[in-house]
Amino acid sequence: MKSENPFDNALAQLASITDIVSIDPEYYEILKNPRRQVVVSLPLKLSNGEAVTFTGYRVQHNNARGPYKGGIRYHQNVSLDEVKALSMWMTWKGAVIDIPFGGAKGGVTVDPFKLGMDDLERLTRKYVSTIERDIGPEIDIPAPDLNTNPQTMAWIMNEYSKMHGHNVPACVTGKPIELGGSEGRNAATGRGVAICVREAVKKYLHKDVKDITVAVQGFGNVGSNTVMSLMEMGAKIVAVSDVFGGAKPIGKKYFEQSFDSLQTSALKAGSVSKIPNVQQISNEELLETETDVLVPAALENQITEENASKLRARMVVEAANGPTTSIAGKMLERGGITLIPDILANSGGVLVSYFEWVQNLSRDHWTEEQVNQRLEEKMMHAFNEVVSLAEKENIDQRRAALVLAVRRVVAAMKLSGWH
Ligand code: GLU
């Protein structure tokens, strides 16, 4: 599959709105480049005695609206350009969902599945102690992303807190509940995606969520929670996949079991594609499934110029960050496929991260009901703002979301006198 540099994709997206928002050249110049890029060497002696040096990144794109915010990913393909793109998308995401955060992203180039828990913990602590001056509750607040989870966040909090001589729960979000994590954070991104699917099919396909079919690529935190929330809403899941392959129900149109039993069988079998009595399908087949909605919830660059014309979905809702290349995006638009962009669709995660940070700073703990209700309200508000702007300016939803975000970020930069 031909891939695109994600940072070029992010820049092309920014360039695509300059005919609608006239951004002063000096601000455009600032927005094109992250403010800070931290690249660190992380030498580690592994438990097997081997000495390896990993590379870690933290890229801080913009903090005009508040402290930098964004996840940390562990993956063998993490590169500076990928983290730069993801940091820019975080700036837009925080602005679209309208929380007082800027955008950042971090990562370590490592295949975490090749390391044991002890080594992963030591790598995480090394990364935190090395970038300790660059992060903090008022500076830059990390969170989970690809292959990192509440346990990783617990190590981050503990390492940071040790260096500061007291517990600092607000230095990271997505923590385990026992350590000050928020109720509902784990499921938040998927829940937000499902809300966008529900609203988008109502608006653009004139269908109730109970009457739609959905194919979901990816069964990590975001993919699996999207499936769960959509099943709860009554949507029909016709295909799912994970890194090992995809699955379709045999002899039925959609998965009829509950989400819990689907997840349990996937865990038992080691992959959704190995669940007994499913038809195994390839990643390509999943993307080309005939369905109302396709939800890419895995990595960047999944919908490309090679496969965009083969899609048989009526709508794409981007749960992953940057899953559609810029050329593929144009092809979908020409083909009449509605696309709900990542910076809106997956913003539920960072939104509940914000709720977690607020709870930590105010020493409070909200109920899951409170969290979910506020998530619903904020997602609905952002969704409606993007939809109205798209209508008003007669542009697609990706550009509308970006216009909304960039206007907000530039306004903050201007008011505070950034030159
Ligand atoms: N990694 C998630 C994202 O890409 C969440 C970021 C956060 O909660 O700060 O949106």
Image: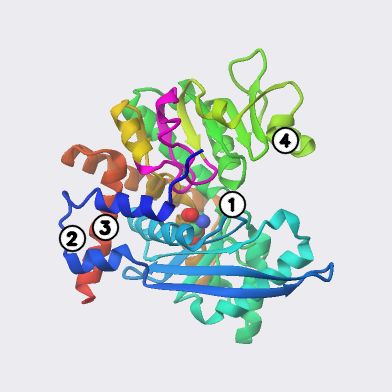
Q: CA distance from mark 3 to mark 2?
A: 9 Å
Residue at the spot of label 2? 23
Instruction: Residue under label 4, please give it.
Output: 266
The mark nearer the N terminus, 4 or 2, is 2
Q: Residue at x 33, y 32 (%)?
A: 331
Q: Nearer the viewer, mark 3 or mark 1?
A: 3
Which of these two is toward me, 92 or 25?
25
- Bounds of the magenta span? 297-326
Q: Who is closer to the viewer here, 183 or 384?
A: 384
Q: Upstream in the sequence, badge 1 or badge 4?
A: 1
Vertical comparison of 8 with 198: above or below: below
Q: Callout 3 environment at 10 Å: few (<14), some (14 to 19), or many (20+)?
A: many
Mark 3 vs mark 1: which is more N-terminal? 1
Label 3 belongs to which residue? Answer: 406
Q: Is the shortest distance between ligand 1 and the CB of mark 2 under 8 Å? A: no
The location of residue 100, given as percent across then percent down, is 36, 65
**Marks 2,1: beta carbons within 8 A:** no
Which residue bears the numbered disc 1? Answer: 186
Instruction: Specify the farthest residue to the bottom.
Output: 165
- Mark 4 → mark 2, Cα distance in angstroms: 48 Å
